[in-house]
Amino acid sequence: MSRIDDLPPLREVIARFDLGARKALGQNFLLDLNLTGRIARSAGDLSGVTVIEIGPGPGGLTRALLNSDAAAVVAVERDNRCIVALADLVAAAEGRLRLIEGDALEVDPEAIAPAPRAIVANLPYNVATPLLIGWLKRIEQFRSLTLMFQREVADRLSAKPGSKAYGRLSVISQWRAEVRPLFNLPARAFTPPPKIESTVVQFIPRQAPEPAEFAAMEAVTAAAFGQRRKMLRASLKSLGNSEALIEECGLIPTQRAEEVPVAGFAALARAWRASRA
Ligand SMILES: C[S@@+](CC[C@H](N)C(=O)[O-])C[C@H]1O[C@@H](n2cnc3c(N)ncnc32)[C@H](O)[C@@H]1O
């Protein structure tokens, strides 16, 4: 047994440090170490990798990550109560766990963890999407991202063209990464239970994504899906000469955003960017 396995059960840690869950911080803790072990294993081979964990909370997933082959874990947590409660885990990890107290939205992954780096996290749901978008912008910095989302967000991340869930988030994520939904967890797996079930999703960076600027992709998908029921020729009007752009990209003016594949949006982003140069 490692020193980590000798630590008290998570429920004891929560009681001792009075870690009542705070809704404003998206705190839904995983206290079953079999489940956290499953999440850590689903991240794949972590040998030699520095893992960034967002929101370690009482440390259930952190323990599992420290029991993996990861070189080290750097955990970013906003709640000072958790930082205090994790002191015993830091000691048991013998130099492999570093805690950073702060807001993950303001943390530069490159500045806190050497390459190769990966992110594994049961994300706070209230900031999960902005965090993901920030990482997708610099996805080449990561080996992989293995992240827990609300099921509804996970469905949007992996949705294919033609489906109701297909939208901005699907296009931006699938453009930059191969998106793999891994498994679902029922609400009762968490303390306290959220309203709906959750899904672990893995992102593997694409080696050669369709060329386009991130800001241009954000702009064209915002315009197209902002009015998703409208045909492209209407929804893209805010981008300027929409008919010319659509034609240049080989798209059909009567198509709707949800019918356009990722490559179509990348072409649109390039053409729009060129039209503004
Ligand atoms: C869903 S809980 C996960 C806790 C723990 N990893 C687990 O699985 O039991 C989300 C965690 O993120 C922390 N958190 C919330 N907002 C944060 C932010 N902006 N930056 C860093 N941590 C944050 C919360 O305090 C909480 O510990």
Image: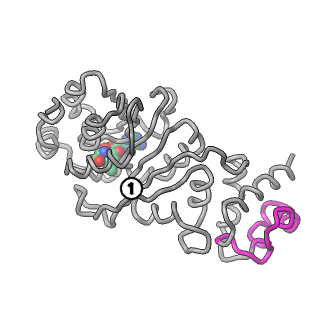
Left or right, residue 161 beside residue 250? left
- Name the foreground residue: 123 vs 51: 51
Above or below, comparing residue 25 to residue 237 in the picture: above
Left or right, residue 94 beside residue 262? left
Q: Which residues are magenta?
A: 232-258
Q: Is residue 101 visible?
A: no
Above or below, comparing residue 143 to residue 235 in the picture: above
Q: Where is the N terminus found, in terms of image quarters?
A: top left
- Name the foreground residue: 231 vs 45: 45
Residue 114 at x, y percent in the picture: 47, 26
Q: Quadrant of residue 254?
A: bottom right
- Name the foreground residue: 79 vs 213: 213
Seen at 34% across and 62% down, the residue is 184
Above or below, comparing residue 235 to residue 47 in the picture: below
Q: Is residue 79 visible?
A: yes
- Name the foreground residue: 276 vs 67: 67
